[in-house]
Image (cartoon, rainbow, N blue to C red):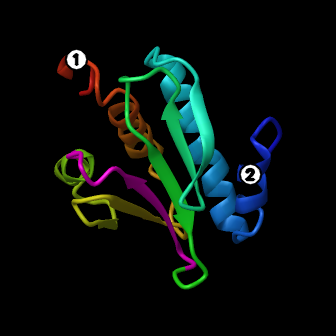
Amino acid sequence: MTHAPALLLSTISHWSDPAQRAAWTCRAVFLETAARNSVGPLGEDLKWGQPAWRPVKPRTGSTLRMDWSQSDPHQLALFVDCKTDLAERMRELYPDLPSNDGRRRIAFDLRADLPEQAVSHLAQMTFTYHLKPALTG
């Protein structure tokens, strides 16, 4: 993936092919969702060794992290701040997602189609978390 920070490229390049494809799809969804919701540019970096995205503008939104592990090779996990209600809200809105601990971890089965609408909604809620409630859907 071009134009991605070197740390993300390096980290994601060690993941399985299905995890890499899902990661780059998620990244595209994150960037498009941030642009569509006018939250400004996203910072892209590693947080706790995991690819992470967060609006650059202060007091806009929260961080959305991603991880894949060889110990659970068929899942790609997204993580939200455990001090938010984002995972709980996602569980209420998308009860059919395969894995959501209701606290911070939402995972997708890499053997199925990526639920892009749910990923986009999670990104929208995360990147606008500190804005007016009407904007966070």
Residue positioned most to the top = 38
Please state which amino acid type lies under the numbered disc 2: Leu
The residue located at (28%, 20%) in the rendering is: 131
In the drawing, does residue 71 fall left or right of residue 7? left
* Residue position marked by numbered label 2 in the rendering: 7
Name the side, left or right, on which 124 lies relative to 112: left
Question: Relative to residue 44, is residue 76 drawn left or right?
Answer: left
Q: Is residue 75 magenta?
A: yes
Against 9, is 135 above or below? above
- The residue indicated by pointer 1 is 132
Dot 1 lies on which element? loop
Residue occupying the point 61% across, 55% down: 22
Q: Secondary structure at mark 2?
A: helix
Cα separation, mark 1 vs mark 2, equals 33 Å
Magenta-highlighted residues: 73-85
Report which quarter residue 104 is drawn in: bottom left
Q: In the image, is residue 133 above or below residue 21? A: above
What is the x, y in percent for residue 44?
62, 39
Q: Indicate which disc, 1 or 2, sits on the residue closer to the N terminus.
A: 2
Q: Examine the structure image and report whether residue 70 is included in the region drawn in magenta.
A: no
Neighbourhood count class around disc 1 (C-alpha, 10 Å): few under 14, some 14–19, many 20 upward: few
